[in-house]
Image (cartoon, helix red, strand yellow):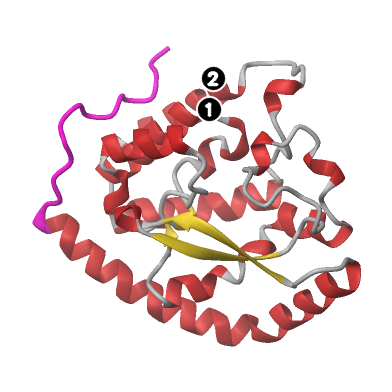
Amino acid sequence: MNEIPAPSEKTFEPTRKFRRYMVLKRILDLITASLAIVVAGIPMLLIALLVKLDSKGEAVFRQKRIGRHMKPFYCLKFRSMSKEAPRYCATKDLQSAGTYITRVGSVLRKTSLDELPQLINIIKGEMSFIGPRPLIPEETAVHALREQYGVYNLRPGISGYAQIHGRDMVSDEEKAKLDRTYLERFSLKADIGIFFSTILNVLKSTDIHEGSFEAEETEGPAPEKAAEEEAEAVLAGSEK
């Protein structure tokens, strides 16, 4: 069985085609996010109210993440955990994340509605709809790999290539490799494919795992291997 194509060992140099699509992508992001804010405005207010009623704390959670060119910014999300949850720890690294997740937060995370405030990040130019997920500064291993692969030439996204091929279930190395694969296939066609795959995965609640999977025994193929097999099938189809 073939593995996901390894990232090129060459240093990534933005081409004219890459720069042109970056401009187009920014225009599309700005228009779409502005319209989405108008349409989702009232539902977002209702969600904020439910979050406040469900548990103590702010409705919108601000957390420092690393953006394009390694520039820090504050990523916005509806709060889905209690105030006692560790603030600067990735959810996948929590041994008992479920104990911190609120009742409303559980629904928001499974439906990805907790990401809606990131429409503001998109309008501000800090994020895009599609791109590598923004990470907290403490995830140094992935940052190092992303920087090596040239991934930080991109704006982070609400969803991305790694998210539809494993999401919470792949290793740091695999995430960085998938991010570089997306960088090398950077195009409107790729973004449209990721967008619709994201919707399908959300509806199916695919690859959602709260807390460290290393602490649990699982049946079936390893998470990284499962992601490889799915990505291989998608990439094979895209080459036809």
| Span highlighted in magenta in the image | 1-16
Residue 228 shown in magenta: no
- Are the residues flagged by discs 1 and 2 in contact, CB closer than 8 Å? no
Question: Could you say which is closer to the camera, residue 82 or residue 126?
Answer: 82
The image shows residue 78, relative to residue 152, as above or below, that is: below
**Residue 77, quarter of the rendered image:** bottom right
Q: Quadrant of the C terminus?
A: top left
Q: Which of the two labelled residues, at mark 1 and mark 2, occupies the earlier sequence position?
A: 1
> Which residue is located at x 85 percent, y 56 percent?
102
Nearest-to-viewer mark from 1 and 2: 1
Residue carrying label 1: 171
Q: Quadrant of the N terminus?
A: top left
- Label 2 is placed on what type of residue? Lys
Q: Which mark is residue 183?
A: none
Real-space Cα distance between discs 1 and 2? 10 Å
Question: Could you say which is closer to the camera, residue 109 or residue 77?
Answer: 77
Query: Quick check: can you spot residue 195?
Result: no
Which class describes the residues within 10 Å of circle 1: few (<14), some (14-19), or many (20+)? some
Q: Is 192 positioned to the left or the right of 101 in the image?
A: left
The spot of residue 191 in percent (x, y) is: 38, 55
> Which residue is located at x 59 percent, y 55 percent?
199
Residue carrying label 2: 225
Q: Secondary structure at mark 2?
A: helix
Q: Secondary structure at mark 1?
A: loop
> Which residue is located at x 45 percent, y 57 percent?
157
Toward the left, the furthest residue is 16
Toward the top, the furthest residue is 1
Q: Is 28 positioned to the left or the right of 24 in the image?
A: right
> Which residue is located at x 76 percent, y 76 percent?
48
Which class describes the residues within 10 Å of circle 2: few (<14), some (14-19), or many (20+)? some
- Label 1 is placed on what type of residue? Ser
